[in-house]
Image (cartoon, rainbow, N blue to C red):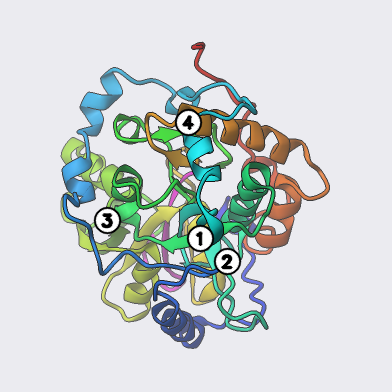
Amino acid sequence: MHARHLRARLKGWGGVGAMAAACALAVVFALAVTCTGSVASQAGAQPAGHRTAKALTVDAARAADDCEAPEKQTLPPSRADGPTITAIKSRPGEKRKLVVGVDQNSYRWGYRDPNSGESGRLEGFDIDLVHRIAEDILGDPDAVQFKAIPTDQRIPAIQDGRVDLVVRTMTINCARLQDVAFSAPYFRTGQQVLAPKSSPVEGYDETLANHKVCTAKGSTAYAKLEEDRRSGDLPASTDISTTVPNQLDCLVRLQLGEVDAVVNDGALAASQAAQDPTVELKGEAFTTEYYGVAMKKDADDLVRRVNQILVDFRQDTATGWQASYRKWLSATMDDDPAASRPPAPEYLRRS
């Protein structure tokens, strides 16, 4: 995901104007709808007992003491149904759908293309995976109720039972493993800096001094900035106070000149650079992270089933992982998907 590999080949999108249209669409489609391909936003209505991501967050340093290689802390694959899958399959009538937390404004991951003839239909790499999971469990790739959730609501949405799982560019890490279970990794990425091409910022280094940086609330990017500020690896004068509910909001802040740079997963930052050719990735990725599907901690049968689906997804060369990468991501990232393909999965040795 080097900056020199980034291609700003945007088909039908164009900088700030396109972003305004995309944001307007996001507001329109944030209404609760239960049909396939639609979204029921939970941002405005939070159930009793709702907890914020901040309240759920376990101190990352303490969690790391008992956790190594978090991407390997998952269960072996299985096709067997258990209580979680049985409950999903037993939903009556039109409610017999997989309820999935997703993003609706991450270009080429989970988004609505304003130029698409099917306005209202979500598409992207994450959405392809959701349809694959629904097809395997319920026999119908469209048996999905999508719920758009902000970055900081991914874990609460799972714990409160608002969704069965989250497929939303969610990094597997030790702190999150205290609260939810993850599948094996389905994508490899790393944190990078996004800034205007004319900016003196050169990457995640001393050039961030005296600059304002935007991150999403509850993101691994913000956790990394906080940790590095404490350790002195990030200049003390770097302002990291700007946090937003969704990572796309950071790009808007950058376009408006309210911040000087964005720190985000390189995979997402590459897509944002494609949305606005006046910005670019600065420097190399400074972390290695893996996206996983998140579920409740006690949903062992669902975790195992999703891991089996991921095995099949990776092995399917016609319509699986590689085909989805080339369709959605090769235009904004490297043509060669090898750098983003996660390593062969490893599982916990537990019955």
Looking at the rendered structure, the kind of residue marked 2 is Thr
Q: Quadrant of residue 67?
A: top left
Which of the marked residues, 2 or 1, is nearer the chain's N terminus? 2
Q: Residue at x 29, y 24 (%)?
A: 64
Which of the marked residues, 4 or 1, is nearer the chain's N terminus? 4
Indicate whether 41 appears above or below 178: below
User: On the image, numbered disc 2 is attached to which residue?
Assistant: 36
The label number, if any, that marks residue 217 in the structure image: 3
The 10 Å Cα crowd at callout 1, few under 14, some 14 to 19, many 20 or more, is many
The label number, if any, that marks residue 83 in the structure image: 4
- Camera-near label (2 vs 3) is 2
Task: Specify whether residue 195 is painted magenta.
Answer: yes
Residue 205 in sight from this viewpoint = no
* Local SS, label 4: helix
The alpha-carbon separation of the residues under discs 2 and 1 comes to 6 Å
What span is in magenta?
A: 189-201
**For this view, does 178 lie left or right of residue 345?**
left
Looking at the rendered structure, the kind of residue marked 1 is Gln
Q: Quadrant of residue 13?
A: bottom right
Q: Quadrant of residue 61?
A: top left
The alpha-carbon separation of the residues under discs 3 and 1 comes to 25 Å
**Disc 2 + disc 1, Cβ < 8 Å:** yes
User: On the image, numbered disc 1 is attached to which residue?
Assistant: 145
The 10 Å Cα crowd at callout 2, few under 14, some 14 to 19, many 20 or more, is some
Q: Residue at x 35, y 45 (%)?
A: 158
Looking at the rendered structure, the kind of residue marked 4 is Pro
